[in-house]
Image: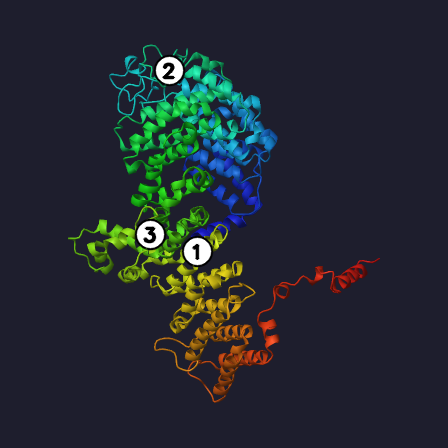
Amino acid sequence: MYSHASESLIKQAREIQESELQKFYSRLMKMLQGKELGHDTVDSLQRLHLILSATKYTRTLPLELQKRFVALLSSPAEQHQVLSAAVLRETLPLTGQELNYNQDNLGQLNSHAAGLLLSQAVSKGDLSSLCTQLLRNLESRPSEGPTHSLMHTLPVLNNVLTHSPECLSEDQMTLVSKKLVDWLRYASVMQGVGTSSGGFFTGPRSRQPVPIAELDGSVSGDFFTVLCVGQGFTEDQWMNVYSFSMLRHWLLTYHSSCSTVDAANRLQLSLSVSHSFSNDDRSEVDGSVVSMVSATSSSSRLLPPKERLREKAFQYCQRLIEQSDRKAHKKTDTELQKACLVEAVCILDCVCVEDASLVYRTFPCIKALFGRLSSELSNARVLLPIAQFYLNHGEMAAVDCENVWKVVFGRFPTELFNDPFLAHELLRFLRLNVESIELRVPQYTRYFPNLLKFLAWDSPAMVDDFVDLLPSMVTTGTAVELLHTLLDLPCLSATLVLQHRSTCLPISEPVGRSFVSLDAFRNPSFRGLFLFVLRTEAGSGDTIDRLSTLHELLVEAADWPRVTQCARTVPVLLHVFFNTIVTIADEKLLAHLILVMLERSSLLLNIPAYIKEIHRVFSCHLLRLCKLHPSLVVNQSHELLEFAGSTASVYSKEELYTHVVWVLGEYLSVSCDSRCSVSLITSCFEALEAVLFEITSSAPPTGTVCPAPKVINTLMSALAKLASRSHDLIPRVSLFLSKLRTVTRSGSVAWCSDEEDLIAIVTRGEELWSLLKAPGVAQSVLTPPPHVIAPQWHRDTNVALPLQLRALTSLTHSQ
């Protein structure tokens, strides 16, 4: 893990003696007392940090040395701040006196000192005390202390709130809300004084205040926001940026859980605010241009602090949306505009959830923003918060959301399926809102073929999301097509790879390796097959007729990494699918699904491990469906007998075939379905008898292995069960079983290569033969009644077992 040199240094640090450590402390103390801290001091600080961190035991620094490190936190050199904070973290928590010392010096607070304070706060009381000190620092006037300290106060406060939201009192929350209002809305509109380079032109005239500018270079005519630029920034402008960065967290933490004024009064007050355009006495400087966003009523000052912050947050976000329409000169500024738009829309959504009256004022702006951004897929990151806003408030505002969902569920997966960041964000959006989406977006389930493209492209990263989302896509209308789509997911993965390669490799460009599937993808005669796989919405058909042709075209994709990874996720999703469908489907739909399983068992992309796993999943859920609804066996008896009567299925679909035979033998009975006739039992018997006779009288086909003993034993058991229900069939089973014993006595047989397996088969045959000699006993043993399968004798008062249990209980619990 470490190099030899590193291990040597760590070993030395761990084995240092206490006397050597004390001498080292003394030398370091002398270095820190000097006026200048050179490279030797930095090396010593690094060595001390190694000594403290290399052992599991926490050490205590000498008091004077600890005070020196606390003072070093305020050093102008950030390297000294980092090292001193790292050393202090490795020591015992500061005592109350030393902690107070540090908090009394919040004027020199920086991010490293703040991190140290948070790490050494051992209780909620310490956090509350720290919050009190921070808020006292916020209340101080600029003349009362160093101004740069405020810029580190809000991030620290935000971290404290993340870990312990309850550490603020109501008065403290009111104070923070008021300060946020001041910083957000009333920051200076003049640029800060930048660092002068000196020279001839340096003088009072060059230091005159200059108005802040917009990202397009024009002079700003409104209040300062995070999207304003300048040569330098004042402290209140920096606080404006910090306030905006923590605004959503603050609103979600405190405003959502706090009681507000009556909704009707709030609505009336907000309407009076929105229809009045007299300026705030502090909102604008003389001669500035007042926009519709910043024109607010002086009556907003009558609002309580929390409602006033909500109003100012609304105005701030409206102003950001207005600024985002400006053409930025730099690419980084364009990205900043998008990031601010995401945050602004999220904040607007938050304030509208808290105050429904703001929905009607916000929606025109959000609707215009969507219309402006929806044509460019580069804005996808911004469109998801807009979709969240439509989802939360579209019904209340009675707006048509169809175009939003066409973009989010239609264009995004179709054109951006290979964007991992968007995939994560979109699936996270769906997981967080799945219940609301099911309720308010009925067309959501139509887009499952499109959404599954994210999974087909990057299965390992997306499988957890779809395990949660798949149940919401399963309905009685989509079940059959969804099952086909899940089984064809490896084909979708391969098709997406071909689509991506097709766009990256022009047709005229020669490639080193020829891909037959890529040529087929570009061939117009096969275009329909691939277009169906890449379809955007469900409803065009459950599957396609030429599925085997598609599998032949994609045969070389079987070993592509994306395809094999996708194939591994399909069994997991199939379990989720069947676990969901049994809770909502009727017998008619379940019967259809059984047909799909039988049909698709031979129509899968040729990946052997994948086919084997799918057959195992089908087997598991076939048993479950038939156990829940035994009448399904009679309803689908023709298809089940057709499948079970095929000898080829014994060798190619061993797992599924075994379970189909077991289901026929178990549930083809009058006790499970009164429609089960003697002729049906006889036809089933004859089909299974023919298969058993064929596989036990000849060697397996070339290229296949001998049938597993489980298959033969299951066939013999099924025949015995059927014969016990129709006694006319017993002589035929007995004759076969006697012949089987005679044949095996002569030595090895071609259809079983293992001697132990052959012995097990013969033993099972003799057991069944012995049972069938007493037909009444055979039926009771092979098809026991329900009360025998699930006995409750300990509850039956008509038998002696409950009395015996009560007697034993009284004896064991007696004194």
Q: Would residue 293 appear left or right of 355 to someone viewing this image?
A: left
* Residue 33 can be seen, yes or no: no
Q: Residues within 10 Å of mark 3 (few under 14, many from 20)?
A: few
Q: Nearer the viewer, residue 641 or 291?
A: 641
- Locate residue 329, reporting x and y percent: 25, 28
Q: Quadrant of the N terminus?
A: bottom left
Q: Residue furthest left?
A: 508
Residue at the disc numbered 2: 295
Residue at the disc numbered 1: 574
Q: Residue furthest right?
A: 815
Q: Helix, strand or loop at disc 1?
A: helix
Residue at the disc numbered 3: 541
Q: Helix, strand or loop at disc 2?
A: loop
Q: Quadrant of the C terminus?
A: bottom right
Nearer the observer: mark 3 or 1; the answer is 3
Amino acid on which disc 3 is placed: Gly
Residue at point 57%, 78% (across, down)? 772
Q: Helix, strand or loop at disc 3?
A: loop
